[in-house]
Image (cartoon, rainbow, N blue to C red):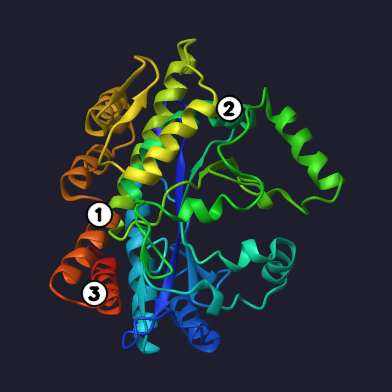
Amino acid sequence: MRIDDLSFSVGIEEEYLLVDPETRNLAQDADRRQGVIDSVVAHIGEEIGFATPEFLRAQVEIGTGVAPSIKDVRAKLSALRRAVSDGARAQGLEIIAASTHPKADWRELLHTDKDRYNTLAHDLQGVARRLVICGMHVHVGIDDDDLRIDLLGQVAYFLPHLLALSTSSPFWNGRDTGLQCYRLSIFDELPRTGLPERFDSWSDYSRHVQTLVDVGVIEEPTKIWWDIRPHCKFPTLEMRIPDICTYMEDGITIAALYASILSMLIRLRRSNQRWRGYSNMLINENRWRAQRHGATQGMVDFGSGKMVDYAELLEEILMLTKEDQERLDCVEEAQNARRIIARGASSQTQRRIYHDAVARGASNEEALNAVVDWLIEETVRDL
């Protein structure tokens, strides 16, 4: 992907939960999890991506190889998600793409026995034990350090709008939370999370990070877990706010919109313009509305000072970035956002399945199992 003389690259990371198809509970067998990962490694080349353990023993993380376009990253992600599913089935398991498991009890789950995760569990104690959550991260490669920092401060405005399209975590500990995205309620218990700080330059950002390293608060910058962050090892701006999308195509849509928004901001910058900055206090109101309502209700349009229906705000974003979608060859993928609104995000369908089952006389356990069965089926539907 190119913006004038600037090359874009894109990569996506996803975290999946391993499920026993008989009980619908999370599967915590470390050997079977390793069998899944070994199967992916055996069948997928490094240019397509990787699979690794994650914090929970019931989790597998994948990451695509660096892709030059949204269409290329879609092909890589599809191959990886299919490979993890096939590897899981070979172990008698299934995968689900949801940011919380509908009925998992965090008190019964075990974390991966690995130095990084053992340190995390020790440092964060009870907060870490509640991390029964999965996410999706989108990396867009931008070589200019100062440009990444400038974009970091501007693109934060759009993060709630992207979160609203991704929501897949309405249940926690076997209960409907009433939220479309409960995952962030858990994740926000960690330090160094939420919306990013604003910095004047790359050197300004680096000084702040180095202060935390020097005093021993963090060992390295990957323990800054903002909704979006400059990656410390690669020249990418890593968006971390979305839930993992049950439908892979929804995740591709969010990646296409994110890349197009960055392209639009760079285009404005080259015309000596920029997106108006708003305080985190204001943006957090829309972040909360995305958690609570997803795309089903309005968000605040701070420019007009009004509450505006989400579908109307989305149309504005699609209009503002149309030129960029065309330049990045992702018009179809970005405009699929309309279909997400019409169909509903995963969280909406999960809640509907659950409440319909209860209305028909199902027990809480039976209704939750119906949700898990739907997640198993839909996670691999559009590969």
Residue 305 in view, yes or no: yes
The kind of secondary structure element at disc 1 is: helix
**In front: label 2 or label 1:** 1
The kind of secondary structure element at disc 3 is: helix
The residue pinned by badge 1 equals: 348
Is 352 displayed left or right of 127 in the figure? left
**Amino acid type, mark 1:** Gln
Mark number displayed over residue 327: none
Mark number displayed over residue 370: 3
Residue 279, position as x, y percentages in the image: 54, 23
How many numbered badges does the structure rendering display?
3
Is 111 displayed left or right of 363 in the figure? right
Tag 2: Cα neighbours inside 10 Å, few (<14), some, or many (≥20)? Answer: some
Mark number displayed over residue 147: 2
| Residue closest to the eye, 42 or 257 | 257
Name the N-terminal-most of marks 2 and 3.
2
Q: Is residue 137 above or below residue 363?
A: above
Discs 3, 1 touching: Cβ within 8 Å: no
Name the N-terminal-most of marks 3 and 1.
1
